[in-house]
Image (cartoon, rainbow, N blue to C red):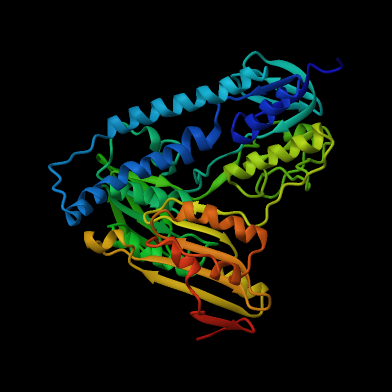
């Protein structure tokens, strides 16, 4: 019993809890410390409450669409405080399940900030106590970038605070063009907030397929979101009960609330990294090898604190691979290739594999299949909203290397289509799959002729 624990985990998010719970289930002595709430960003102030807000914000359109199907919907109203209270109750339930899972596995939990104090030492700051462990996992995740260089940044909120606003603002401007900015722009607009999104790049959702980015931009504007690209915030100032946001183009926006959604930073500051000599990259992320090992042989890092793929299922997968490698004598490196993802924008976006832009850089000849159509749901509602589906095929071997979907249930479809793409399915495999009619998803297996081709990295119509 050279150490107090066989494993000590710093961070009680999805990756840390999965590692701690399953290692404890193997009969090992496990300690885990979390300074805020178990469940991490995703459960407490990220994916889960965000999607609950997305559901809440979509009902206004549902009520409108019902008329086309013969329903008469009476006067409706929305109560922000009810949504917040119900959200809080669900998050508390989920946190309880995370804690219960650890307790049932006999892992010892600590409600405190913890830092690395040595290759085998962890300091629990609540009582300034040092415990020892044979292996240490750092899984503290990240935090919103609060842009301290922006004059007036202290007047702004981030994704941490938006879930607990006491009142729903009448107007809001959001800085950013990624997942968080786009998703909350849709949420706020759906709840009746006058919403503007300001992004420094030429189009929202960098790294996604350009056709879908442009199509989503158009659909968001139809829903009342003002989208401003190629501009940034210059300063934020208090103006009575409102805030004035000066943009780089000179325009001044007067709003009730300002949100910064310009990326996240790893929570490695003051975590003991320099004391122990753990290598960090230029952005503060922990550098790891293919097995999640740091340069200190007794310390590993999982999830968003590394610079790999900042998604909850990826952190969980990395935790499972860590367990296989270190506790089951089965060296397993995390597989970060072909990861499906969804943006819960309105309309929703789901994607897996290469974008057309990525594929054009890596593959000489492509077949591009694209369909733009009105979902059946909107034929009677009369809503002016169109869906887009796009399949990228390597014409040399007819392998499907990317699929991109924008519209209702896009995330659900992307999750399913990720399976054949991960397996290496060909376009023939898609084509010989019988369609389910009438569904939107049948378009994925009924686009028989390319919309256009890419030959020698150039589009040919």
Q: Residue at x 60, y 43 (%)?
A: 313
Placement of 250 over or under 320, stated as above or below: below
User: Residue 126 in the image: x percent, y percent?
Assistant: 62, 16
Placement of 185 over or under 128, stated as above or below: below
Left or right of 147, for residue 121: right
User: Residue 188 in the image: x percent, y percent?
Assistant: 32, 47
Left or right of 402, for residue 440: left
Placement of 374 over or under 292, stated as above or below: below
Q: Residue at x 77, y 37 (%)?
A: 324
Q: Residue at x 79, y 16 (%)?
A: 4
User: Residue 443 in the image: x percent, y percent?
Assistant: 45, 67
Residue 100 seen from this side: yes
- Between 295 and 125, which is closer to the camera in this rendering? 295
- Indicate the quadrant where residue 271 lies: top right
Left or right of 125, for residue 55: left
Q: Residue at x 86, y 15 (%)?
A: 1
* Total tally of numbered discs in the picture: 0
User: Residue 199 in the image: x percent, y percent?
Assistant: 43, 59
Placement of 24 over or under 152, stated as above or below: above
- Indicate the quadrant where residue 363 lies: bottom right
Residue 270 seen from this side: no
Q: Residue furthest right?
A: 2
């Amino acid at each position: 019993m050279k150490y107090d624990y066989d494993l000590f985990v710093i961070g009680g998010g999805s990756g840390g809890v999965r590692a701690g719970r399953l290692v404890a289930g193997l009969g090992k002595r496990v300690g885990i410390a979390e300074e805020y709430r178990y469940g991490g960003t995703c459960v407490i102030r990220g994916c889960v409450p965000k999607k609950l807000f997305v559901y809440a914000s979509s009902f206004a359109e549902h009520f409108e669409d019902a008329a086309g199907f013969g329903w008469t919907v009476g006067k409706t109203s929305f109560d922000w405080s009810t949504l917040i209270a119900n959200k809080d109750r669900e998050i508390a339930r989920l946190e309880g399940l995370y804690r219960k899972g650890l307790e049932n596995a006999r892992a010892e939990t600590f409600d405190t900030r913890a830092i690395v104090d040595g290759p085998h030492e962890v300091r629990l700051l609540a009582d300034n106590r040092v415990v020892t462990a044979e292996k240490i996992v750092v899984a503290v995740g990240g935090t919103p970038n609060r842009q301290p260089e922006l004059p007036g940044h202290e007047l702004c909120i981030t994704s941490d605070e938006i879930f607990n606003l006491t009142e729903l603002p009448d107007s809001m401007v959001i800085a950013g063009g990624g997942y968080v900015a786009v998703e909350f722009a849709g949420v706020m607009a759906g709840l009746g907030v006058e919403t503007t999104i300001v992004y420094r790049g030429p189009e929202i959702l960098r790294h996604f397929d350009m056709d879908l980015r442009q199509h989503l931009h158009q659909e968001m504007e139809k829903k009342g979101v003002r989208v401003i690209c190629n501009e940034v915030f210059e300063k934020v100032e208090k103006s009575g009960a409102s805030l004035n946001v000066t943009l780089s183009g000179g325009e001044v926006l007067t709003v009730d609330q300002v949100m910064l959604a310009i990326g996240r930073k790893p929570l490695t500051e003051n975590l003991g990294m320099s004391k122990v000599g753990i290598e960090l990259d230029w952005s503060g992320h922990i550098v790891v090898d293919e097995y999640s090992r740091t340069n200190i042989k007794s310390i590993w890092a999982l999830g968003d604190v590394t610079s790999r793929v900042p998604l909850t299922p990826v952190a969980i997968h990395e935790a499972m691979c860590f367990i296989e490698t270190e506790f089951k004598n089965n060296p397993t490196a995390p597989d970060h290739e072909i990861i499906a993802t969804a943006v819960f924008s309105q309309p929703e976006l789901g994607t897996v594999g290469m974008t057309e832009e990525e594929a054009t850089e890596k593959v000489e000849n492509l077949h591009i299949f694209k369909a733009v159509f009105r979902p059946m749901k909107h034929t009677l509602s009369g809503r002016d909203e169109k869906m887009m589906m796009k399949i990228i095929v390597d014409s040399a071997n007819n392998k499907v290397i990317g699929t991109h979907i924008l519209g209702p249930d896009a995330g659900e479809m992307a999750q399913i289509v990720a399976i054949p793409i991960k397996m290496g399915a060909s376009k023939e495999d898609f084509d010989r799959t019988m369609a389910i009619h009438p569904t939107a998803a049948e378009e994925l297996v009924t686009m028989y002729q390319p919309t256009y081709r890419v030959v020698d990295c150039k589009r040919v119509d």
